[in-house]
Amino acid sequence: MLLAFIIVYLLITLLIGWWASTKVHSTKDFVIAGRNLPMFVAACALFATWFGSETIMGASSEFVENGLIGVVEDPFGAALCLVLVGAFYARPLYRLNILTFSDFFRLRYSRSAEFISAIFMIPSFFGWVAAQMVAMSIILGAVTGITPLEGIMVCTVVVVIYTYIGGMWAVSVTDFIQTIMIVVGLLLIAWQVGSAAGGVSKVLESTPPGFFNFLPEASFESIIHYIAAWITIGLGSIPGQDVFQRVMSARSAKTAVRASYLSGFMYLTIGAIPLFIGLCGHILYPDDVHGGDTQMVIPFMVLEHSNLFLQIMFFGALLSAILSTTSGAVLAPATVIGENLVRPYFGHLSDKRLLHIMRLSVVGVALASAIMAAWNRNIYELVGQSSALSLVSLFIPLTAGLYWRRASDFGALASIVTGMTVWVLCEFVLTTEFPSLIWGGLASLAAMIAGSWLRPDRSYVQFREATG
């Protein structure tokens, strides 16, 4: 019966994508839903950007193992990112009427900056998509017994079909419906397992001393790693195309700002529910860890110790979260490929042809991510790596381009390349104890400042003249 529900749910998702495809008549419809989403729908879309496997399965696992300080990255860092987007980025970027972050790099700096930013942005999404595919393969394996590789293939096919045909309209509509499923499903499960564990007070009291400490130890190393956890998603996902497309899909700049604030609040509050569920599961069934994988605790606890209705609600919520995150993360790099890599360098493309290229790019991104998912199946690691890529290469040039008049094209290019180079060296060659993304971020900042002072230009003046 549970398997039948999952099949029906996936079919409904595909039907939503087909319905949404009737609203797609241009690249603007496909990429940013015609800039026509009301505030609550836009907020649900932003909330669903990352509320997937990492928060429900990955973060709950980290919470049980390491306490509150172990989940600073998600959900706290993710909520911080959405609030910062609303405070400093949504309004000025919305007014530019562009499709991608790389469009901003072209307007503010140069076509070279557009190309380089696109090249560095696209790979950052593969980890996000791969993490969701791993999670869905876990769910399908728990319910049906299929292998992880087969589960990844199923997830790839479903997401590609409804994202390919419906674009951001399909993503936004399903995000709205899936947010409701997520909240209802998680609340029901939290109520059941909380009651079985003796209530909220008993669950909280059963944790070891220091479990809810939210500040690091008073040592340099602990503080640096704490800062790194906050900024991995908190700053690293600000230049994320998936967030940008959802912000740009709102009806107005004011709507985009308010939706960002609301989604940040939703992420922080709703994100606490799976943490509580994971804690209850660990207390009730401390030995029920499938194969030693703590990411499996919640799915297997629900499958083995809940009635059919609650199983349907939980797995419906989990599938909703995964599909929401995956679809947006696939659409984002596909948009950048079409808009910033193909369009500027292959002559004058018609809007219809560009739309076709973006749809084909959806397929390519999904296949590349599926390969990555088959190679690395740790959800938390996949997400953390993808966020670090954007932080060390794109965050500084984006922020400086908006708020520093002296930021130059040479400074932006130096910032992107230097930040990424230093991060790669620290992460894969030197393997220092100091967080690699801190080194990469500092190198990006230093290169931006030095490059802009050494080779200043009139890019800011030209940007203001072009955009009014």
Image (spheres, rainbow, N blue to C red):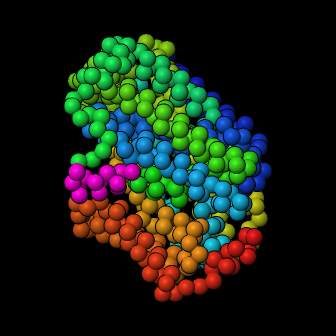
Tell me if residue 219 is in the magenta stretch.
yes
* Outermost residue to the front: 218
Name the main secondary structure of what is drawn in magenta.
Answer: helix
**Total marks drawn?**
0
Residue 385 vertical placement versus 271 (above, below) = below
Query: What is the magenta range?
Result: 218-230
Nearest the camera: 18 or 244?
244
- Whether residue 171 is visible, yes or no, is no
Nearest the camera: 294 or 437?
437
Nearest the camera: 343 or 109?
109
Question: In which quadrant will I find the C terminus?
Answer: bottom right
Q: Is 343 on the left or on the right of 134, as rendered?
A: right
Residue 21 % position (x, y): 72, 43
Nearest the camera: 54 or 143?
54
Q: Residue at 21% of width from left, 31% of height from top?
A: 209
Q: Is 447 on the left or on the right of 238, as rendered?
A: left
Residue 421 % position (x, y): 37, 72
Q: Residue at 22% of width from left, 24% of height from top?
A: 287
